[in-house]
Amino acid sequence: MKRHDDPAFHDRAAVQPDATPSIGVLESKRPHSSAALDRVAADLDQSHLDWLEEEAIFILREVAASFERPALLFSGGKDSCVVLRLAEKAFKTRQSARSGVFTGRLPFPLLHVDTGHNFPEVIEFRDRRVAEMGERLVVGHLEDSIRRGTVRLASPTESRNGHQTVALLEAIEAHRFDALIGGARRDEEKARAKERIFSHRDGFGQWQPKQQRPELWTLFNTRHQPGEHFRVFPISNWTELDVWLYIARENIPLPSLYFSHRREVIRRKGLLVPLTAVTPPEAGEAIDIADVRFRTVGDMTCTCPVESVAADASEIVAETLTLTVSERGATRMDDRSSEASMERRKKEGYF
């Protein structure tokens, strides 16, 4: 592994959890940083991040130049926070070289589909971050789809994750979006590994994996008919490790759930299910208290944490180097229903 020789790297501040206690978090616990973790971070060659950043900014500017009504999908998750920072670099003016403050406005709004079962900490972070930036946020509420009758739940506690597709497509139609910028990466899951950077969706919002357009070098085919749209993924070529290295380098703020905290969990089928109003214990299950963090955040009914004492981005970088299971494979109950569950949902219009 090539040694990183930039002395400024050692002075970069890692992202800290929110100072205020989070809803559902019993007690914050921050372990002391070890010299071993510092040595691992110092030995990492991060020069490739500049190439990944340059590619992503180029893609974002292509979207702004090629589409009339694009939007950036922003859930408050780590990947969407990274894409948001890249968009700031693409379209705004940074106040200083090391500052995280940008002036100006993005050329598109932010879009989030709220299932009603999102983690409260993430919704609070989403609203606070948007307010700080002064950007426009469009929220598609699944509750509105339920009231319209376009979504029908089998039970009040049913997972709403798969039903997001309906609310998403309704938001696209209502606002006539012709491109949605997302934070999906190819290393997350098998179906996402098949995805193009500029991914065409037909008039029904569906993805046809066998009819994808070729992408040679940086030539993207963005032609589409009225009613069709594109999903664009600027960080397709990034890995989970790249994301955390970039978060640490750029000091990108994140919801506190991403960092180690003590939480009540239920050990179920090899996963740690967070104890919430919509994920209560089943008969015979015991409630445990563990030091955990979330590798990804989503609907509470299908998103699980992992045991971890990593309390900042640098510690998560060191921890990520030892992982052998993707974040979705390790934390998402909905992706375990079948080998093709994600591909089926994507064909129907899912993120």
Image (spheres, rainbow, N blue to C red):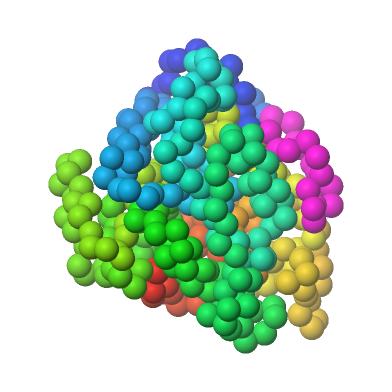
Residue, far bottom: 154
Residue 257 x, y percent position in the rendering: 68, 48
Asked whether, in this view, residue 285 is left or right of residue 329, the answer is right
In magenta, the rendered stretch is 16-33
Residue 308 x, y percent position in the rendering: 67, 48
- Image quarter hosting the N terminus: top left
Residue 72 x, y percent position in the rendering: 45, 48
- Image quarter hosting the C terminus: bottom left
Asked whether, in this view, residue 52 is left or right of residue 309, the answer is left
Q: Quadrant of residue 317?
A: top right
Q: Main secondary structure of the magenta part?
A: loop
Residue, far top: 7
Residue 29 painted magenta: yes
Residue 160 x, y percent position in the rendering: 59, 73
Is residue 103 among what the camera can see?
yes
Is residue 307 among what the camera can see?
no
Above or below for 60 versus 298: above
In this orientation, which residue lies closer to the viewer: 315 or 178? Answer: 178
Asked whether, in this view, residue 247 is left or right of residue 293, the answer is left
Report the label total: 0
Asked whether, in this view, residue 102 is left or right of residue 239, the answer is right
Identified at 49% across, 33% down, the residue is 105
Identified at 41% across, 26% down, the residue is 45
Identified at 32% across, 48% down, the residue is 68
Residue 312 painted magenta: no
Identified at 41% across, 21% down, the residue is 3
Q: Quadrant of residue 64?
A: top left
In this orientation, which residue lies closer to the viewer: 318 or 175? Answer: 175
In this orientation, which residue lies closer to the viewer: 274 or 128? Answer: 128
